[in-house]
Amino acid sequence: MSVWQRLKEDIDSVFARDPAARSRIEIVLTYPGIHAIWWHRFAHQLWRWRLSLLARMVANISRWLTGIEIHPAAKIGRRFFIDHGMGVVIGETAEIGDDCTLYHGVTLGGTQWSAGKRHPTLGNGVVVGAGAKILGPITLGDGVRVGSNAVLLQDAPPGTTLVGIPARIVGQRPQISEQQARIAQRLGFDAYGAAQDMPDPVAEVIDRLLNHVQAGDDRLASLAARVRALQAQMAGTPPEPAPTEDPPLPSLAGCHLARAPANEPTEVDVVGCPTQTAPKPVPPTNTNPPPGSA
């Protein structure tokens, strides 16, 4: 592939992933992600020619101009796109496959000072959301999506979606046909590495715990009422009401850790628990008449 064909391929990859792009001349003149890739190819070729100092100088000039720092030794595949780009850091031994997308603030860094492989390896079609940190000599399989601000320290199997700190797998893409993959690439590109229906695993677990605790409280109250009724039946007396000295349990009704989806309208769309007002004290009823009364 000639140089001009490679440049055209880079520009077309921006059109395929950024709906804000209006013309090729706009991309060439105003997209720092494209500029950083072109500068890197020049620096990488100098690095291969063992002109390491000159390669580092070119990479440093690219960082000043674009805000994107790519070590000249990093290996980057075809149709690589850095959207916005400010604050992106790609380490020396990082390897990036074809059709990958990185957003601003992404770091492909190392966790050790020893020589050798110490930066991540990204497969084909990987999307890394804004602010995500991928650290260490780990491998991300083809089609992996990393959510914004996630911190990934372990390998990720192909087709998975990861969010959180540390990053956890929250989804697995199903196996689809080649035609479905082309349609998904055109219509289902997930900006910033996050889908609209992406769950929060921490919120999901805590929601289930809250529901479990509320159900346990309800069952305990029902068992206590049955015990009092059974005691009254055995004693032949009317069942006594619940003792007033027991403090009421705080209700978990209406507590939410996430807002309701847009397609599910609800009266209370809050994160947290509704404000509870303390019940007004009821004055005691005195059944004994005062002294001296008729």
Image: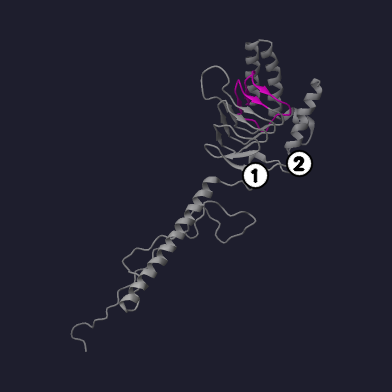
Q: Is residue 86 magenta?
A: yes
Identify the residue at image location x=63%, y=54%. 262
Along the polypeptide, which appears first: circle 1 or circle 2? 2
Give the residues drawn in magenta, as a range: 67-96
Assess whether mark 2 and mark 1 are in contact (beta carbons under 8 angstroms): no
The label number, if any, that marks residue 14 in the structure image? none
Between the C-alphas of marks 1 and 2, the distance is: 20 Å
In the structure shown, which secondary structural element does the residue marked by tag 1 occupy? loop
As drawn, the residue found furthest toward the top would be 50
Q: Is residue 88 magenta?
A: yes
Q: Pointer 1: residues within 10 angstroms few (<14), some, or many (20+)?
A: some
In the rendered image, residue 203, in percent from the top left (x then y), is placed at 52, 48
Q: State which quarter of the image contains the C terminus.
A: bottom left
The label number, if any, that marks residue 177 in the structure image? 2
* Residue 66 relative to residue 1: left or right: left
- Is residue 275 shown to the viewer in this render? no
Amino acid type of disc 1? Answer: Ala
Identify the residue at image location x=61%, y=59%. 265
* Residue 198 relative to residue 20: left or right: left
Amino acid type of disc 2? Answer: Ser
Q: Pointer 2: residues within 10 angstroms few (<14), some, or many (20+)?
A: few
As drawn, the residue found furthest toward the front would be 234
In the structure shown, which secondary structural element does the residue marked by tag 2 occupy? loop
Q: Camera-side residue: 227 or 221?
A: 227
Q: Which residue is mark 1?
A: 195
Position of 212 relative to 91 (above/below): below
Looking at the rendering, which quadrant does residue 71 occupy? top right
Position of 91 relative to 153 (above/below): above
Q: Nearer the viewer, mark 1 or mark 2?
A: 2
As drawn, the residue found furthest toward the left would be 292
In the rendered image, residue 11, in percent from the top left (x then y), is placed at 77, 30
As drawn, the residue found furthest toward the bottom would be 294
